[in-house]
Amino acid sequence: MANDGHILCKKCRQVLYLGKYKEGRFWPGRETHEQFKLGVAQFIEEHFAHGDVIVMGDGPYERYLDSCPSNEWPVTVLIEATHDGRIKLVEQPSAMRG
Ligand SMILES: [Zn+2]
């Protein structure tokens, strides 16, 4: 059964959506697996020093959202491949659930 992955920085209230986890890896969006890994590393490096970065599957993430008011839900960030093969982390306009 597929399970979504999320990396949450509690301090910034940003969550990097990792895509579906199945067959031992994540299956994100349009970017390649190499670009995906660069994006994950970039997100962790940007937020590691903030002290409260956690990786969560669907269940724990749902429980986290349930535990905080909806106006404090984290903003979802996606890894986006640019046309020249680099990547950028892009905030989604509004917090998405699930
Ligand atoms: Zn942060």
Image (spheres, grey):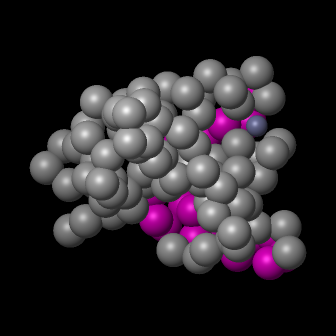
Q: Residue at x 38, y 42 (%)?
A: 83
> Eyeballing the image, is 44 above or below 1?
above
Residue 81 visible in the snapshot: yes
Q: Is residue 66 left or right of residue 35?
A: right
Tally the numbered discs.
Answer: 0
> Eyeballing the image, is 79 above or below 75?
above
Q: Magenta stretch?
A: 51-70
Q: Is residue 56 left or right of residue 26?
A: right
Quadrant in which residue 25 is drawn: top left
Q: Quadrant of ligand 1?
A: top right
> Eyeballing the image, is 57 above or below 62?
above
**Which residue occupies the foreground of this view, 90 or 1?**
90
Q: Residue furthest front?
A: 84
Q: Is residue 52 left or right of residue 35?
A: right
Quadrant that contains the N terminus:
bottom left
Residue 77 lies in magenta, yes or no?
no
Q: Position of residue 13 (x, y in %)?
A: 77, 52
Q: Residue at x 69, y 69 (%)?
A: 93
Quadrant in which residue 47 is drawn: top right
Q: Residue at x 46, y 36 (%)?
A: 87
Residue 58 lies in magenta, yes or no?
yes
Residue 56 visible in the snapshot: no
Q: Residue at x 61, y 74 (%)?
A: 96
Q: Position of residue 66 (x, y in %)?
A: 70, 75
Q: Position of residue 39 (x, y in %)?
A: 47, 34
